[in-house]
Image (tube, grey):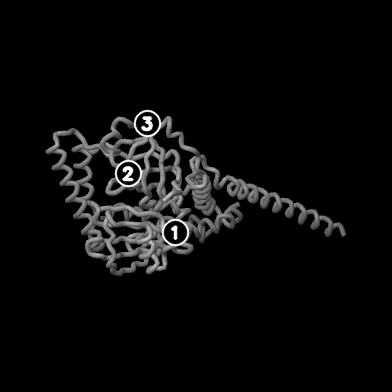
Amino acid sequence: MKKYLSMHKILNQKLLIMIKKILVFSITVLFFAACGNDDNNSTNPSDTTEIKTNELTKLSLTNFDSLAGNFVGKEVAVEGIVDHVCKHGGKKLLLVDGDYNLHVFNDNRFDEALSGSKVTVTGIVEEERVDSAYLAEKLKHEEGSTGEDNEVNKEQMEQMVKYVKMMQDSLKKSGKEYFANYSLKFVSLKEDKEK
Amino acid sequence: MHRDIGFFFIGTTIIYGISGIALNHLKDWNPNFIVTIKKMHTDEDFSKEKISEPKIKKLLSQLNSEDTYKTYNYVERNSVLRIYLSGRSTVSIVPKTGDVTAEFVRKRPLFFEVNYLHYNPNKRWTWFSDIFAGALILFALTSLFMVRGKKGVWGRGGIYILLGILIPILFLILP
């Protein structure tokens, strides 16, 4: 009887430890499940926070490149069609209007369903300077990359080398110190439901 | 602890395992989407001057896609009309020739979801996956003390450990 009671006690203790462990795991799981979708800059189209366009400069894609230099580091609004959301990470989208385009970068994923939608994106203008040192480094990298995997890769690599060389020539001819590439760091987005 | 945390992370390990293989072969396939191309010809005038939504929808009805229409855009100096459909699908028309290329895109089941997580969709997942990565380090370290004797670290196990370290080093050294 004594032996039975001692075993019972051990079993109870083991059960308690197991329950404690399960509880710790459950709380951890619940924490992540509960917090899963409440990121501040979520891009769900239904979260159409009102864009205060009155206080913002609204730039059109057609003149974005020529004006963006004046707004580096500042918040602007840009209208366009989402050509696609990056198929890999989903943290980049291409905004288009005719042949004009602009990349918008986000820390979180964009909603896949945005592809093909007319939107107004608010974001901070970022500038990437492409100078001769950058192009030389890029050329070195492309020429050194392994394009022998298959014919498609080899062709892509050759095209890239050709493109970089063309950029080097253009920069030389332009007399400028650098070309500026502009993009937007995502802040918010409003989907235009009218077609 | 090794065992319990191991059980807890079985699902996450499988997610990273499957998506790891899928993403390793990005050059060979599209692990996220299944793309179907359909080509046809149209006699309608789709030039920028003559475009209208009813005309677009009429063409889309021939592709059974009129309900998915979203918007359109002219690209390549107005030489190509790109019609956007829901779910990343597009229809491209060259008005001059009447050539129509429809690209229907749909998510690849399972792979889309596991790759979605592998690409680190938001900060919460970053935390969770960091904990998972930490757990992997913990598994490696605790496994050193799990088996003693001939099959442990000072026996056969040690040879496996050295081989497992040597292989990545060889990949770094060899061209």
Q: Residues within 10 Å of mark 1 (few under 14, many from 20)?
A: many
Q: Position of residue A32 (x, y in %)?
A: 58, 47
- The amino acid sitting under disc 1 is Ser
As rendered, which of B38 and A18 lies closer to the eye? Answer: B38
As rendered, which of A185 and B81 lies closer to the eye? Answer: B81
Decide: marks 2, 3 in contact (CB < 8 A)? no
Kindly report which numbered mark, 2 or 1, lies closer to the viewer in this rendering.
2
* Location of mark 1 (residue): B19
* Location of mark 2 (residue): A102
Q: Is residue A36 above or below residue B113?
A: above
| Observer able to see residue A78 | yes
Q: Is residue A62 above or below residue B160?
A: above
Q: Position of residue B52 (x, y in %)?
A: 34, 57
Disc 2 chain ID: A
Disc 1 chain ID: B
Residue at the spot 17% in from the left edge and 51% down from the top edge: A162
Decide: marks 1, 3 in contact (CB < 8 A)? no
* Location of mark 3 (residue): A74
